Amino acid sequence: MRLKILLAIVLLTLQVSAVDDNGVRHYIKKYMEKKTNSKVNKIETISHYEIAGTNGWEVYFLSLDMNIKLGKSYQKRTIPQVVFTKGNKITFSLKDQYGQSYAKLLKPTVPVEAYDDEHFLVGSKNAPHKILVFSDPFCPYCQEIVPEMISMVEAHPETFGLYYYHLPLLKIHPASDVTTKVMHLLHKRGDATNLKALYHLLLDPKEKSVKKILKAIKIKTGKSFSKSDIDSSDIKSAMEFDKVMKKRLMVTGTPTIFIDGVWDPTRLRYKNYIKK
């Protein structure tokens, strides 16, 4: 089938045979500064690779540290930007043959440093396949998918290593705040059994009472936690780290799952590696 590429706003056609990483950052910096009338302090390439089936188009995932003008003042912001290149062309928009935007179909590849000891949960660190997940215990799709995935990895440690990142969606699930902090503690202890149990709390996701949430957790797991336990500096630092990785990988919802460094929009691709 012939691939139909739709382009919108080709920013630059350069007088060179091809655009490299330095060229992409240079021209996007100039374009953004002119377009927004704001200074780009730093621009970093998070990830880039050739898009399969597009006859040579590449995607670049950039992070721009900018001083954005808001009214009469400037504020520092980190802005993610997706850019596509082929030869001497650069564009913000590239669509597939069905008219779907590649900016929504693709994500950065997972950096090696994301697979650290602090985020390893179950399976084997030396397994041939690495799964990385961002999850919220009150997300309905997470409740359906993630506990089963953890159990699958536990049953096949020769095949998988699972790395878990906490992403509480506090605007729609306020109860995730306290629950996720407890999950951080369970994660640190290597207690995957009780971490899974917190996906099935008998609790309103909009509950904000720390006392009620901790009581529900004790009923479910038999484990007691205090407010001082969940308000520790270690927990705050861990949650901030997860937020940074969420931005780096341009994660926008839960569950977001990567298999062997590549985003899996189906969330089920890991099952293809399970021997039957």
Image (cartoon, rainbow, N blue to C red):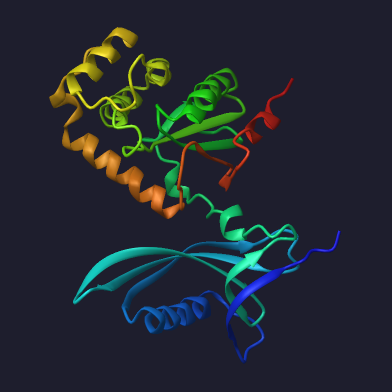
Relative to residue 167, is residue 69 depicted above or below? Answer: below
Q: Quadrant of the C terminus?
A: top right
The residue sitting at 49% across, 78% down in the picture is: 22
Extreme residue toward the left, this view: 228
In the figure, is residue 168 to the left or right of 146? left
Extreme residue toward the right, this view: 1
Q: Quadrant of the N terminus?
A: bottom right
Relative to residue 185, is residue 24 depicted above or below? Answer: below
The residue sitting at 17% across, 25% down in the picture is: 229
Relative to residue 94, is residue 157 depicted above or below? Answer: above
In the figure, is residue 56 to the left or right of 237? right
Extreme residue toward the bottom, this view: 15
- Tell me the quarter of the picture where residue 29 sits: bottom left
Task: Point out residue 174 in the picture as x, y percentages from the top left corner.
Answer: 29, 32
Q: How many marks?
A: 0
- Tell me the quarter of the picture where residue 192 sits: top left
Task: Point out residue 116 in the picture as x, y percentages from the top left corner.
Answer: 41, 40
Task: Point out residue 35 in the picture as x, y percentages from the top left corner.
Answer: 41, 81
- Tell me the quarter of the picture where residue 165 sits: top left
Task: Point out residue 190 in the picture as x, y percentages from the top left corner.
Answer: 37, 22
The residue sitting at 35% across, 36% down in the picture is: 172
Q: Foreground residue, 98 or 238?
A: 98
